[in-house]
Image (cartoon, rainbow, N blue to C red):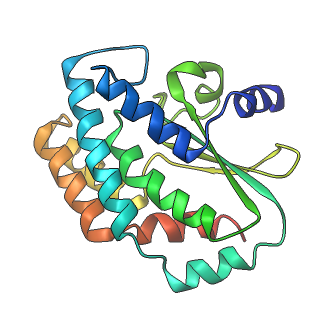
């Protein structure tokens, strides 16, 4: 797995390069990923707005900030994402804010569909669910991984699917409302708990 991770790191993007790539593709009427559709383009456009809002409104939890600032060893946080993914749009700005809080964290992003060998190492119930955060030490060894959703969001979808049999548009709306109400706190606390 180390060679798969190192290969992904060599082809990774910074957060700003990822945002620029997604924006340029939207301008060209496209989304990231192997599949192209009007729906994926629409989700990419929605996510662009969400990420812009989150970048302006997210606030760092004080306990999380303290733990991040006390991080002693260098780490790379490698996130597997796609521009059309609603969960990624809600979570990437949180991860970026956390990475910026510590001089010991280097944030990198790769596209899932361009790194199938990597996502296949981190399936969720057999699915290529994203985003996935891989926490790596300075030698690119895996320390831990997280994703695709914080526990509360995951449970919302599990409960909805149990009741309705599918994840449809009302489920997606409920999920986005959950993220809005949570303000990133669950994601921050779950990720920082893995750094102990």
Across and down, in percent, residue 11 comes to 68, 27
Q: Nearer the viewer, residue 38 or 87?
A: 38
Residue at the (13%, 39%) spot, across then down: 169
24 shown above or below 145: above
Q: Nearer the viewer, residue 106 or 182?
A: 106
Q: Quarter of the image containing the N terminus?
A: top right
Q: Place residue 78 in its image quadrant.
A: top right
| x and y, in percent, of residue 193 in the image | 62, 70
Quarter the C terminus occupies: bottom right
Answer yes or no: is residue 152 visible.
no
Q: In this rendering, would 89 be left or right of 112?
A: left
Which residue is at a point 53% across and 58% down the rendered structure image? 95
Residue at figure coordinates x 32%, y 69% from the top left: 182
Q: Position of residue 153 (x, y in %)?
A: 33, 56
The number of callouts visible is 0
Residue drawn at (83%, 72%), measured in percent from left and top?
Answer: 72
Q: Nearer the viewer, residue 47 or 124?
A: 47
């Amino acid at each position: 797995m180390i060679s798969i991770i190192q290969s992904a790191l060599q082809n990774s993007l910074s957060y700003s390069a990822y945002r620029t790539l997604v924006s340029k593709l939207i301008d060209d009427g496209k989304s990231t990923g192997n599949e192209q559709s009007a729906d994926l383009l629409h989700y990419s456009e929605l996510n662009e707005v969400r990420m812009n809002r989150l970048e302006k409104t997210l606030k760092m939890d004080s306990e999380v900030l303290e733990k991040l600032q006390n991080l002693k060893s260098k780490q790379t946080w490698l996130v597997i994402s796609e521009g059309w993914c609603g969960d990624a749009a809600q979570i990437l700005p949180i991860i970026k804010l956390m990475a910026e809080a510590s001089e010991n964290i280097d944030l990198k992003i790769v596209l899932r569909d361009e790194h199938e060998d990597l996502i296949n190492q981190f399936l969720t119930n057999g699915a290529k669910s994203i985003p996935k955060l891989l926490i790596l030490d300075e030698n690119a060894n895996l320390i831990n991984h997280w994703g695709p959703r914080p526990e509360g969001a995951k449970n919302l979808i599990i409960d909805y699917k149990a009741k309705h049999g599918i994840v449809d548009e009302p489920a997606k709306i409920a999920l986005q409302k959950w993220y809005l109400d949570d303000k990133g706190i669950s994601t921050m606390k779950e990720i920082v708990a893995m750094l102990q």
